[in-house]
Amino acid sequence: MFGKDNKLLQHHIVNIIQHNTVVNGDIQCNGDLRLDGIVKGNLKISGRLVMGHDAVIEGMVECENAEISGKVKGDIKVKEVLQLKKHCFIEGDIFTKKLIVEGDAVFNGKCIMKKTENVTGSEKIKVAQL
């Protein structure tokens, strides 16, 4: 009834880095990542990043969606929705399509938000000149 490409049959991968775990180096993972430990390196995630309030990232982050409660020192590139929860601390630039910021979230940097499908050729030139 369902083909091999049907998403209902595919297993969803969730990677977990627990408390008291320190990773020194870059991480690239397919699926989602739940981070409660410390990463000193860049993260490239094909799915969703969820950071607990004790989690720390010192490096660049790239993912599809993110919910951040911890600390990030580095740029964050999120293709869809970025949620900054009330205890998060971000020191770096944000590039995303949609941004949700809760009260008491701290963000020091610049934020660039755009919907790429709505950008015309002349607007692309203006953005490039900035």
Image: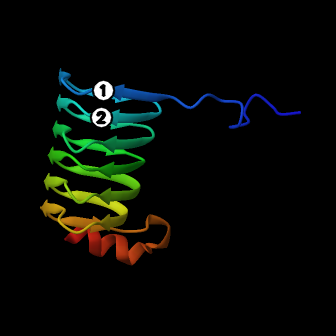
For disc 2, the neighbor class at 10 Å (few under 14, some 14 to 19, many from 20) is: many
* Colour mode of the rendering: rainbow
Residue 86 in the image, given as x and y percentages of width and height:
23, 60
The quarter of the rendered structure image containing the C terminus is bottom left
Residue 59 is situated, as x and y percent measured from the top left of the image, at 16, 38
Give how far across and how far down residue 5 sits, in percent: 72, 33
Residue linked to disc 1: 17
Is 93 in front, or is 8?
8
Q: Give me the residue at 21% from left, 70% from top.
A: 129
Say what secondary structure mark 1 lies in: strand
Of residues 54 and 115, the one drawn nearer to the viewer in this rendering: 54
Number of other residues with Cα within 10 Å of mark 1, as a class: few under 14, some 14 to 19, many 20 or more: some
With respect to residue 114, does 13 lie above or below?
above
The kind of residue tagged 1 is Ile
**Which one is nearer the viewer's eye here, 119 or 87?**
87
Q: Residue at x 23, y 58 (%)?
A: 94
**Residue at figure coordinates x 35%, y 70% from the top left:** 124
Q: Which residue is mark 2?
A: 35
Give the residue type at disc 2.
Leu
Q: Are marks 1 and 2 in contact (CB under 8 Å)?
A: yes
Q: In this image, 21 relative to 34: left or right?
A: left
Would residue 24 be seen by someone viewing this image from the given angle?
no
* Count of picture labels: 2
Instruction: Point out the image quarter for the N terminus.
Output: top right
21 or 116, which is in the foreground? Answer: 21
The earlier-in-sequence mark between 1 and 2 is 1
Give left or right: position of 118 versus 52: right
Label 2's element?
A: strand
User: CA–CA distance between discs 1 and 2?
Assistant: 5 Å
Is residue 111 something that shows in the picture? yes
x and y, in percent, of residue 22 in the image: 17, 23
